Image (cartoon, rainbow, N blue to C red):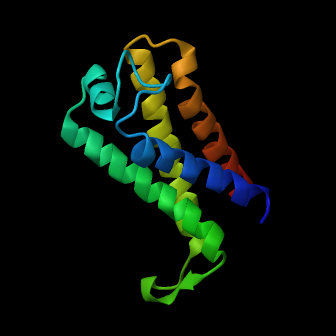
Amino acid sequence: MDFTDIIKLIIGLGLINVWVLRYNKKTEYRGGTANNMLEEFHNYGLSKSIMFLIGFFKISLSLVLILSVLISDLTFDFLGGVNLNGIVFYALCLMSVVMVGSILMHLKINDPFKKSIPAFLMFLMSTGLIISMI
């Protein structure tokens, strides 16, 4: 396991933690005064459907990152010879975009910077891995 694998696991497991294990729990990083994920999205002015869509993306992208560490350099013949590194690259690109969205939501409701730190760190790690793959 190398440094990039560790970063992928931090991102993936971190988001699984937030979206699965702490979904209905208050944390110091929730937007506004939210006590759970649904309240947080309500504070941002976003619907429950959007919350589920964002959650689906974050969990799916997290699973891609985690599985990429476990499976490593496989080529998926049934996908026309797509290499796992290509899939990971696009997952990281999408993750970076989603994290920018998270940061913007915190800014939208005037949260203190502290509440944006997890999203900001996930963005930096995702972007750093993208740059390392170019």
Residue 41 visible in the picture: yes
Rendered image quadrant of residue 106: top left
Residue shown at 56% from the left, 52% from the top = 13
Q: Where is residue 31 in the image (x, y as percent from the top left)?
A: 40, 22
Residue shown at 44% from the left, 82% from the top = 79
Q: Where is residue 76 in the image (x, y as percent from the top left)?
A: 51, 84
Nearer to us in this view, 16 or 84: 16
Nearer to us in this view, 45 or 20: 20
Q: Where is residue 85 in the image (x, y as percent from the top left)?
A: 61, 69
The answer to whether 9 appears left or right of 91 in the picture is right
The answer to whether 129 appears left or right of 88 in the picture is right
The answer to whether 132 appears left or right of 21 in the picture is right
Residue shown at 25% from the left, 40% from the top = 50
Tell which residue pokes out farthest to the bottom in this image: 77
Rendered image quadrant of residue 9: bottom right
Split into 4 quadrants, where in the image is the N terminus?
bottom right
Label total for image: 0
Residue 89, placed above or below residue 54: below
Residue 134 visible in the picture: no
The answer to whether 131 appears left or right of 44 in the picture is right
Q: Position of residue 98 (x, y in %)?
A: 44, 41
Residue shown at 53% from the left, 67% from the top = 87
Split into 4 quadrants, where in the image is the C terminus?
bottom right
